[in-house]
Amino acid sequence: MRNFWSTIRGLVGSAAAAALFSLVVVAGPALPQQRAPRDPAEPRPGKSQVKNLPSPGGAIARQSIDEKSMRALIHNLVSCGTRLTLSSWTDPKRGIGCGRDFVAARLNDIAKDSGGKLQIVVDKFESKSERTGPNPVHLENVYAILPGSDPALAKTVLIVVGDMDSRPSNVMDPEADAPGADDDGSGTAVSVECARLLSKAAASGRAKFRATLLFGVLSGEEQGLLGAYRLLEWTKEQGYTVGAMLDNDIVGADPAPGGPHRVRVFSGNGEIEDCDSPARELARAIEEIDGPNAIRMIFRQDRYGRGGDHFPFYKAGLPAVRFTEPLENYNHQHQTPRTENGIEYGDLEKYLNYTFMGNVARDNAEVLRQLGMAPAPPTSARLRGAVTPDAKVSWDAQEDTERAGFEVLWRETTDPRWHVYEVVTEPGEAVLKGVSTDNHFFAVRAVGKNGARSIAAPAETERRAPPGPSKSSP
């Protein structure tokens, strides 16, 4: 190659050779021209347009978010010095008990303004893990509960949580400072603000929540998700079915230029072959409600090598996702405050972005508002039609006088989002003429007369392995 360029340079001069080299490098090999897909039409041309009900009115306005009260709550939590689970539960000025007192006081104030609709529960329990030592330790969760108005759906609970505990560099050190402004004072503030917004909407009559809403502030997250495991157990003790679980953990900072950016929503895919998990369907519902400009869906169960309070619910097969800020700064997480080599470590208030955090609070509250107004999701959704020209989607549903019907959904297997194929009024079976069962995934969701939509129920297929060689008899 060197001899080639030496020859060129000698023939046409160095300037011309340089121009020729630039042309070759910049242009590169010609790429094949992109063409429109040439696949058969599915369904065949002529299918009528779908007429969808609009989403329910009365969306939560961004200006209704009380950033001042969120800031005050986080400041109070940071003033406790540390909120490590192993710190004091009885000292009113330092330790996790101090944090619990601030959370409970704020929620009680909100409950007073709700006209008695919001109920506050302090759930005391014991648990242990590798990060607590050999013996069980005392823990407490705080729940604010807004009971559902529909007897048929009141035992379905929609949950939003943050966790009030924090940690220093040494997760077993209860004496070191651990301000925890972002992790997870921010998630705590989001959950509490959701309680204020939605209990106020219920008290004023602006929203009628058919399902029960639970606004949780958990402990023991840094010691092994202990508060989340307890909340899952508590819901079962109360006879609830979890319809959705929104975990807000590290949702308070957005330092990259060009913000505010989208919040990340993490969802795992589960273990059902050719079918999405309830968590993934919840993530899709969140993006559809809040919009793709607000939500960045991440198709992972959690950040790589990390864990959050949604995990116990996800592993139980429930719709549970995690909200987390766009890009994390690990110098401001799980660090005892200090300065080393000119770098400041510590999870401090000054690094928070309340514009971004307020957006996250609004996103969570609007999701809970719409899901809380929606009918129950369909059940027993199934796909038939193998080796036939038509896909057949069937499902069951209980009677519901407030339901307008169902949307039959479909998408390419590589498409992250659902599209409405048709709208039907009654449960049963929909035949999608000329639509291949192989090329698409399918689901069904219920739609209320108010326009609120349930989480989609994916249509599961009966999986049969292809025939293989027969085993010889012994």
Image: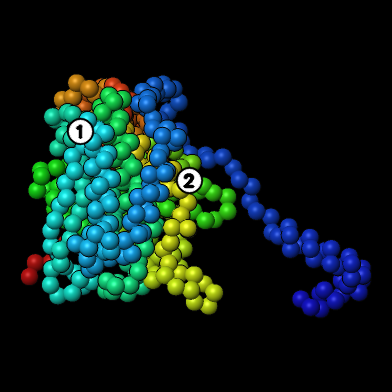
Q: How many marks?
A: 2
The amino acid type found where label 1 is placed reads: Lys
Residue 117: mark in rendering: 1
Viewer-closest of 1 and 127:
127
Q: Quadrant of the N terminus?
A: bottom right
In the image, residue 80 above or below residue 197: below
Q: Secondary structure at mark 1?
A: loop
Residue 355: mark in rendering: 2
Q: Residue at x 69, y 55 (%)?
A: 30
Q: Secondary structure at mark 2?
A: helix
Q: Residues within 10 Å of mark 2 (few under 14, many from 20)?
A: some
Q: Which quadrant would residue 141 be assigned to in this image?
A: bottom left
Q: Residue at x 42, y 53 (%)?
A: 252
The reply, left or right, for residue 348 in relation to residue 114 is: right
Q: Residue at x 34, y 42 (%)?
A: 193
The reply, left or right, for residue 162 in relation to residue 20 is: left
In the image, residue 323 above or below residue 446: below
